[in-house]
Image (tube, rainbow, N blue to C red):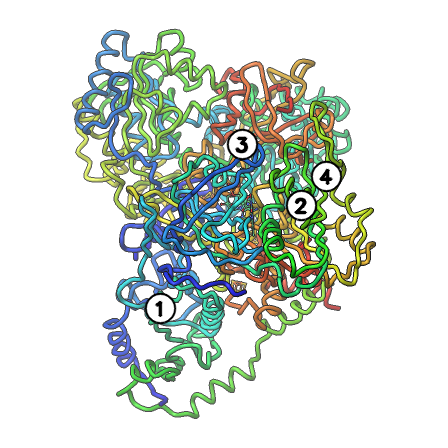
Amino acid sequence: MTATLTTCPYCGTGCMLYLLSDGQGRLVGVEPSAGHPVSRGQLCVKGWNAHAFVQHPDRLKTPLVRRNGTLEPAGWDEALDLVHQRFRQISAAHGPDSLVFFSSAKVGNEENYLLMKLARVGYGTNNIDHCARLCHSSTVTGLVETLGSGAMTNTVACLDETDLVLVIGSNTTEQHPLIGSRILQATQRGCRLIVADGRRIKLSRHADLHLRHRNGTDVALLNGIMQQILELGLENRAFIEERTENFTALQESLAAFTPERVAAITGLQADEITAAARMFGTAKRAMLLYAMGITQHSHGVDNVRAVSNLALLTGNLGKPGTGVNPLRGQNNVQGACDMGALPDVLTGYQKVAEPSVRDRFAAAWGRPLPDRPGLMATHAFDAALAGRARAFFILGENPVLSEANQAHVVKALAAIDFLVVVDIFPTETSAFADVVLPAACYAEKDGTFTSTERRVQRFRRALPPPGEARADWEILSALLERCGLPAGYPGPGQIMDEIAAVTPSYGGISYPRLEESGLQWPCPNHDHPGTPILHRQSCTRGKGRFSPVDFRPSRELPDAAYPLLLNTGRTGMHWHTGTMTRRSHLLDREEHSAFIEIHPEDAARLSIRDRQQVSVESRRGEVRVMATLTDRVPLGQVFMPFHFVEGAANALTNNALDPESGIPEFKVCAVRITPC
Amino acid sequence: MQPRPCPNQPPSVYAPRPCRLLSVTDLTPQEKLFRLQLHDGEELGHLPGQFVQVSVPGLTEAPISVASSPDRHGAFDLGVRRAGRLTTALHALRPGALLGIRGPFGRPFQLDALAGKDLLLIAGGCGLAPLRSLLQYCEDHRDRFGVLHLLYGARSPADLMFKEDLQEWQQGECFDCRVTVDQVPATGCYDGATGLVTGLLGDLDLMPHRTVAVLVGPPPMYRPLLEVLERKGIAKTSIMLSLERMMRCGIGKCGHCSIEHLLCCQDGPVFWLPEIEYLRGAL
Amino acid sequence: MLKRLDRADLEKLLAALATGYRLLTPQRLADGTRLHRPHGEGALALQGEPVQRKPTEAFFPQHDPLLRIGEQGEVTTCDPPDRPVALFGLNAADLACIAFIDRFFADPPADDHYLARRKDALLVGLTGFAGPGGDFLPPANGMCDLELLALGQNWLGVPWTPRGEALLEGFPDGEQAEVEELQETARTRGNPAQDLLEKAAGLVASEVVPDDFWREIGDRCILCSGCNLACPTCTCFCVEDRQEQAATLRSRVWDSCQFDAFMREASGHNPLGTEALRTRRRIHHKLAADVTRWGEFGCLLCGRCDRVCPTGIGIQAVAAEILARFGA
Ligand SMILES: Cc1cc2nc3c(=O)[nH]c(=O)nc-3n(C[C@H](O)[C@H](O)[C@H](O)COP(=O)(O)OP(=O)(O)OC[C@H]3O[C@@H](n4cnc5c(N)ncnc54)[C@H](O)[C@@H]3O)c2cc1C
Ligand code: SF4
Ligand code: SF4
Ligand code: SF4
């Protein structure tokens, strides 16, 4: 009987829990950590089931190598040698930038660090990216420009001290449940709540104001609110003067966003916009929370700028109970970004293009770094089809289900010369691989994850990996060694020491300091207590910058041929492509097949009954799923989760990209539905 | 008649007994009839209205009513609709396959209370499968009952289960058997009655004081049917119905089948109407 | 015979328990969680809130292997561990919860799997001044093999079964008057939580609580299932099959009636198809249905669901709200 304190493998909320085993090597349950500042003895349903998939019989247990078209078991040395040799060959023939590395927001910081090191100095390319491209790349781009740091400015506990929460584009009770519940608790003590979301999500039932604006019109809505705040004189003049720049430009840009015009764009009533402005503008302390509803648009960065502008305009920054709070999706997406698993930055967002940065890393690593920023994940598939990217190394990701426009991804993966997939389960992506390497999951290794509130915390080994599976850091160390780089790390703790040495914001982080509930970065030195709230005296970049934005409609809107707007996302029970949750008995039982939410009136018009199979088509694909009739979705809109391979939402979605962040437009495309 | 105890006690209440599939017959496009025999040659020892937990390794278990009378010795029948994972796997099985069975479980039709009475036996859809155990019992013990009315409604002619049995029951002496379907597809050739099963009750000559009604059907069938029965003067205390609930154990422990303080698997699935009609969510 | 134990005696008792049993004692872990852990793993935490994980887990774990089915359909049951468990440090509510589910699982047809784990287990109550910071906990007056009543630095040992009697043998005798003093303290303090629960239960059972109320509470449920998983009298389970080599391992796992699929049938029919209905069930089941079926509340006020619920709608919070709104 053992109890191992560790971090939840699902969302970025970062709850800590005990994994309980029966002492004979079987995980038997989960118990929340009582002392952790976020979990506080509580968990969401996924956390309570965090043990359930770990020992599933489908786990990958031996390396697999494709021989004569089929994947066959192979030894580790054989598989790793093959990977190294093919990467070397392809690099020699087509240049190092023909190699592409996808890291993972599911593996530890140490492992992200090693993979980006492997890509950059092992194989000489900056072509490294991960799924943050698909969730918060707009945030990183937008907030770095306006505030200087692309992370949640405040901390979850700030919800206990705020007077108003504006949630826009986040189904918090389902996607960050222990932040969602904290919002509900705040409303119980009288905190006001504005929810801006087309869907009637659970939070909206507790909102003082529920703004059901059309998907993709967030810029108009936020500009409209700001225009009214100025109109009502509710802006924070002192803060604007002291702490910001470029206010006049903002002011000018807002003039055109009168309530009437905004109402016409968003589908809201003009007075709803004024009411929101009044409520937000008069709140003493207000927190802005947002997630994928803001970022996953072809104008995702503009959306983020608008959110940031609103916070600056009202002075809601740099103190408790305020802030711009992007809720990061994956348990370690914050960490994967921090670790520089991105094509343009190294750890701690140090720019690759900066010669002094490259010099410092070259000194630490003993090899020069490539200077040109690499390919974004979403561009890598185009590059593959164009013959420029020829070998992919995919660590713990399943792009066949998670990227927009599935057909495009499948074509790209079929076109390349060599694909390596490291995963814990066989996936839709590993089916295309030439080499599959079995990895240990979070419960079988040590490391750190960084939660959405920048909290770096430990996950710990509770049992050995199945079969011959190895921790990702061990796999990556073996490849680093094959590249002639010293990688004899005794454990992840020593990798963290190396990270701290090259990363100012992680400078004070070391395993002994993380024993209980972790540290929030920036934590520059060993005496620093960590930083719960950013931008206190001044912004990371100095002055907060107003970045005016104009409204741009989504790339593909409903028309006569495809009359319904498809919104996609997740449910509370499942995680992303379902590799873990669909193998967790209770979660799978709760939702075990693909569905689409349709408004009853739309359904009646289309002669669709509840629970009937329907065909959903977009310009990019067709899937068959079960119809669920509900007024949670607004008229004219349908919603599909992307968890299900047999009804893959991303066969339909549009891979129109944001020009700056490269994020696809997951939240808006046009479909038609017919009963089967 | 008491359930015959099984001499080979299984090692645990949760241990299925091995069971051989003797034959599989198509009943409708969604339903098949499975004839099974306990592997050790034992009798199942059930009573009409009871159910078994059918175990398929890898897919757990599902409760299925026994569709044959205990007096048809040597084997027992299950009529199974393809509804989900386990039932789909069952439908793929061939004769000779090995299955697991636990049970019989549950409170059966109250045969004592039926003896000497006119019976109004009403089945909707898949409900004919559980009722068939009682129908066969009535056939085998015809002299114990008065008039036997059998009413059966299905969605369409193709959905009628046990077509051969129905033909026999309609032509034979035992039952006054009436069948209806909700709708006939434009292309179908069917010359029987159409409309809901409630419609069959209209011109039925009943002697309310000596009639017991037995109802087995999908949840939406009960309320309208009970209204008509009330109009026909059947006392609530003379109405018995079989309920279906999600079940995982069959022995009153898993909790899925609870109806307020009752447990469908132990206190039911057959209930007298007054036992449940006042309970929230029962009907 | 009543005994009086000092710290050294207590250690002696624990050592004796550890030889015959898998002894679990309350310990406070590094992050502050108080859990039952194998004795000796960490420092004893003799005072404090109830152990966070429900003690009934020892007999009915979250993931509980029932049996293995071989390729030929042959069944082998999963036998209980060699040594029975001794649970040390249970308060009155937890002991009552164990008694509650003992009766539930023993009710025919008995759950032999549970009983096999429970049969030889030993329960040691720890009451008196053993609450958080030495707060008073009412005596259990039974429901265990032996009870220790904490007095500060000493403990009164009360045996309730022959096994308890044997374990206490050899320790110095205690004064009955000291027990009576503790009983008196319990009487004068009363049990306001119990009173509140009873009043709320009356309202729930008489159906004066409208559906709108359940909808409102249900709207706050984020479907974490924690209230059920934490509750020592919640016994609902789901069954999971898993392929292990050639055999199938069949296990039961804790389930929650707050899930939509808890009662959803393959046809889609769902008698508990809304959050309001499920929330009503969670409360009604414990406060009304269990009373009808078993003659006893299904909530013994252990406090866990109120601690674990992320949105503050555990049973005592809901009971208080019911009383405030409909109790006039
Ligand atoms: C007392 C009783 C008698 C029944 N008799 C028959 C019968 O004679 N013929 C017949 O075709 N069907 C009968 N059913 C319904 C049958 O049990 C379900 O159709 C079946 O469980 C669906 O299982 P599945 O795995 O195919 O579906 P899935 O949707 O994959 O279900 C998964 C699990 O949920 C549970 N479950 C789902 N629906 C039900 C349900 N309605 N009742 C109980 N558990 C459910 C089962 O445990 C099942 O294993 C009966 C149900 C009950 C309660
Ligand atoms: S809220 Fe997130 S981190 Fe917490 S238990 Fe749920 S999935 Fe895990
Ligand atoms: S207080 Fe909550 S957890 Fe404890 S017995 Fe009552 S209902 Fe169960
Ligand atoms: S603990 Fe609270 S939020 Fe979680 S399921 Fe129970 S009532 Fe709902």
Residue at numbered disc 4: B180
Q: CA distance from mark 2 to mark 4?
A: 18 Å
Which chain is mark 2 on? B
Q: Amino acid at mark 3?
A: Ala
Name the secondary structure under disc 4.
strand
Residue type, mark 2 in image: Gly
At mark 1, the secondary structure is loop
Q: Residues within 10 Å of mark 4 (few under 14, many from 20)?
A: many
Nearer mark to the viewer, of 2 and 4: 2
Instruction: Point out the frontmost of discs 3 and 2.
Output: 2
Say which element carries label 3. Answer: loop
Q: Which residue is mark 3?
A: A594
Which numbered disc, 3 or 4, marks the residue closer to the eye?
4
* Residue beneath disc 2: B172
Single out the mark in the foreground, 1 or 3.
3
Residue, x 29% and y 37% (percent of image)?
A440
State whether residue C208 appears in this view.
yes
Distance from the alpha carbon under mark 3 to that under mark 4: 35 Å
The quadrant in which the C terminus of chain C is found is bottom right
Residue C24 in the image: above or below residue A134: below
Label 1 vs label 3: CA separation? Answer: 48 Å
Query: Is residue C123 placed above or below C4 in the rendered structure?
Result: above
Q: Are marks 1 and 2 in contact (CB under 8 Å)?
A: no
